[in-house]
Amino acid sequence: ATPQDLHSFPTRRSSDLVINCVTLLQAPVNQNLGETQILCISGSCDGTIKVWDLTDALEYAAEPKLRREWKAHTQAVKCVAVTGNAKFAKAKGKKTICISGSEDGTIKVWDLLASLETEDPKPLLSWSTPPKESPPKESAPKESAPKESAPKGPVNCVAAINETKTNKPLCVFGLSDGTLGLWDIAKGQDASNILAYMKLMFDEARANGIRLTRSGFHRY
């Protein structure tokens, strides 16, 4: 079947540049009545995040409403991700969070629904990757083993998920230097050791002739 354009709308103004990323979220309006709203979150080259309400646009072909726009990063927003029902150790209740990654090497976590009601939203959490280093000048080769470098440079992609049992949010991010990182948002700390453990597990499985399918591990 040919995809149909349900509704398109212009987002570009004189102050806007290219839109790099979008994601969708079905968020509650009134939990008692079961009412929901469909939100579109976009990230732009001017460092802003915009939240659009698509509820009426999809149902009545009306113009989408720009609910909120704020300056999130000093450089282009490269990626955004959302997750609901996220539980934080130092916050009451559960939150719907938006994670943004930028060309400036920062990743920020936003309380999305609270940001809709705030003129100047502030991130719940923010951390930076070291800046990408310029290539070193040519010199005589050293005999010492190369040191393992820290992740550097722009953030190209982010993904968010909640742990099944605790609903604590985790963020996976990819950097321009080829690094894949994992961050425990609830604790505000690096959790990359989980990725290292998973890699060891899969490498060992492959070495023993075991492959992973949707139904689990199988020997071949």
Image: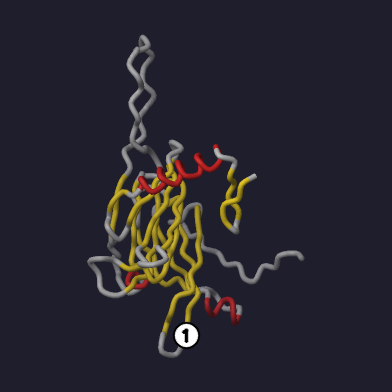
What residue is drawn where x is 42% and y is 66%? 164
**Which residue: 35% across, 19% down?**
145
Q: Which residue is mark 1?
A: 35
Furthest-left residue in this view: 90
- Determine the image quadrant of residue 167: bottom left
Q: Give above or below for 50 relative to 130.
A: below
Residue at (77, 65) in percent of width and height: 1
**Which quarter of the figure is the C terminus placed in?**
top right
Residue 65: x, y in percent?
48, 74
Q: How many marks?
A: 1
Amino acid on which disc 1 is placed:
Glu
Q: Residue at x 75, y 64 (%)?
A: 2
x%, y% of residue 103?
Answer: 40, 45
**Which residue is situated farthest in the top direction here?**
140
* Residue 204 to residue 158: above or below: above
In the foreground, 53 or 181? 181
Hey, which quadrant is residue 186 in on the image?
bottom left
* Residue 25 placement (x, y as % from top left): 48, 69
Q: What scheme was used to colour the molecule? A: secondary structure
Task: Give the quadrant of residue 141.
Answer: top left
Q: Mark 1: which secondary structure?
A: strand
* Residue farthest to the right, as pictured: 1
Question: Around disc 1, counting alpha carbons within 10 Å, would you say few (fewer than 14), some (14 to 19), or many (20 or more)?
Answer: few
Which residue is at the front of the view, 76 or 176? Answer: 176
Whole-percent x, y for residue 163 in the image: 40, 63
Q: Nearer the viewer, residue 138 or 140?
A: 140
Name the residue at the bottom extreme.
Answer: 33
